[in-house]
Image: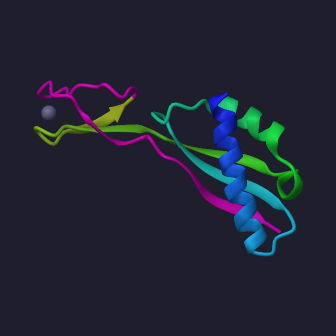
Amino acid sequence: MHEMTIVAGVLEIAHRQAAGAGATRINRVVLEVGRLAGVEADALRFCFDVARSGLSAIAELEIRDVPGRGLCPACGASRDVDELAALCEACGNVLDISGGRELRVLSLNVD
Ligand SMILES: [Zn+2]
């Protein structure tokens, strides 16, 4: 499963940072996930619960949703988009995606 690979990477980052900070446990991992990143939030949560262990055994996953954003290279118009292939409503050009592909660890809460 695609999401399990992502969660494994997220937990690796979290464990490395927590260990580097001398933490004994990770309470919360805040993940920023764009709507165009191609991952399912529910699947991420499920995989996280399955994969957490050691320092992250009781960690919670918080997902911050980032809307998709398209910018028209021709006329400069921008709008929220739900798909990677979107057209400018003003001039019909294909929009450049300027937001919504994020997938990164924003912060950790550790003890
Ligand atoms: Zn346009």
Corner quadrant of residue 25: bottom right
Position of the C terminus, as image quadrant, is bottom right
Q: How is the image coloured?
A: rainbow
Q: Is residue 24 left or right of residue 6?
A: right
Magenta residues, start to end: 82-111
Ligand 1 location (quadrant): top left
Report the residue at 36% width, 31% height from top.
81
Q: Is residue 39 above or below residue 73?
A: above
Q: Is residue 7 above or below residue 84?
A: below
Corner quadrant of residue 90: top left
Q: Is residue 69 magenta?
A: no
- Secondary structure predominantly adopted by residues drawn in magenta: loop
Q: Is residue 64 left or right of residue 99?
A: right
- Residue 5: where, in percent of width, then height? 66, 38
Question: How many numbered discs sit on the rendered protein?
Answer: 0
Position of the N terminus, as image quadrant, is top right
Report the residue at 19% width, 37% height from top.
72
- Residue 36: where, in percent of width, then height? 45, 33
- Residue 29: where, in percent of width, then height? 70, 54
Q: Is residue 60 left or right of residue 105?
A: right
